[in-house]
Amino acid sequence: MKTATCFLVMLSLLAVGCGSSNEGDGGGDDDGGGGGAALQCSAIGWCTTWESDHEVVTNAPPLTGGALTDGLYRTERGYGFREAMLIQGKSVLLIGGSWSNFVGTWKTEGEKLIVSVSRSCSDASDESMTATFTYAFAVKGEELYTQELDRTNMPIVGWRKVRSLCEESASFNCKVLNCACVVTTDKPLTGQSSCS
């Protein structure tokens, strides 16, 4: 992604394909969870110069699936990504750290997380899109680990459930001089100015 490439490099993220833990716990072979209103592409906008640790994730659990629950997940480790994903029921919002999102649905099939994107939006455009991303994944408490399967030699990326995208942590913070972190909710991403 600008976000898809990043996210793939993430989850390459979240932020497409939300899984919930409704009556079904989001794990196993299911359709990703319960109902609820679908997320909109501009539900959350994010622009930041902060980034996750660049170190390779070496302590991930086996990528054998698990139960994804609703919430906001942000990259914490694995090649310095600025990505997040919001999971809400069957909906997922992949959020790039430079006003660039993908929205769609998610489901699990065995040990795979499958995200089907239906729309992309950014500071320059808002349009329909059809794409599917497949990841190996594992859930460990409040942490999510993903590895894109659509391309070879993709890194494992570590995500952590957070309350706010601008909540600094030891592994996600500002590593440059022009520190910035801006979040919008339910505002169009088109026309947003750079935060760098």
Image (cartoon, rainbow, N blue to C red):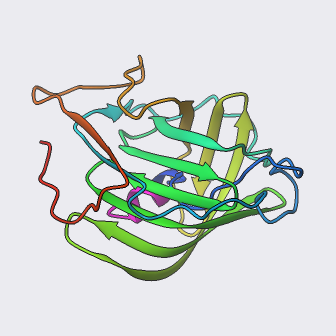
147 lies left or right of 130: right
Position above or below: 19 against 109? above
Residue 112 vs residue 39, the one in the foreground:
39
Q: Quadrant of residue 164?
A: top left
Q: Is residue 77 visible?
A: no
131 lies left or right of 112: left
Quarter holding the C terminus is top left
Residue 137 vs residue 38, the one in the foreground:
38
Q: Quadrant of residue 16?
A: bottom right
Q: Kindly identify the residue that appears in the image at 78 percent across and 57 percent down.
A: 33
134 lies left or right of 82: right
Count the numbered circles shown: 0
Give x and y (percent) for residue 187. Answer: 30, 56
Residue 55 vs residue 49, the one in the foreground:
49
Give x and y (percent) for residue 84. Answer: 46, 45
Residue 72 vs residue 152, the one in the foreground:
72
Give x and y (percent) for residue 118. Answer: 51, 77
Looking at the magenta stretch, what is its main secondary structure? helix
Q: Kindly identify the residue that appears in the image at 78 percent across and 58 percent down.
A: 34
Residue stretch in magenta: 1-8
Position above or below: 14 against 107? above
Q: Is residue 8 visible?
A: yes
Quarter holding the N terminus is bottom left
Q: Kindly identify the residue that appears in the image at 39 percent across and 71 percent down.
A: 120
Q: Quadrant of residue 171?
A: top left
Give x and y (percent) for residue 40. Answer: 47, 64
**Residue 62 colored in magenta in the image:** no
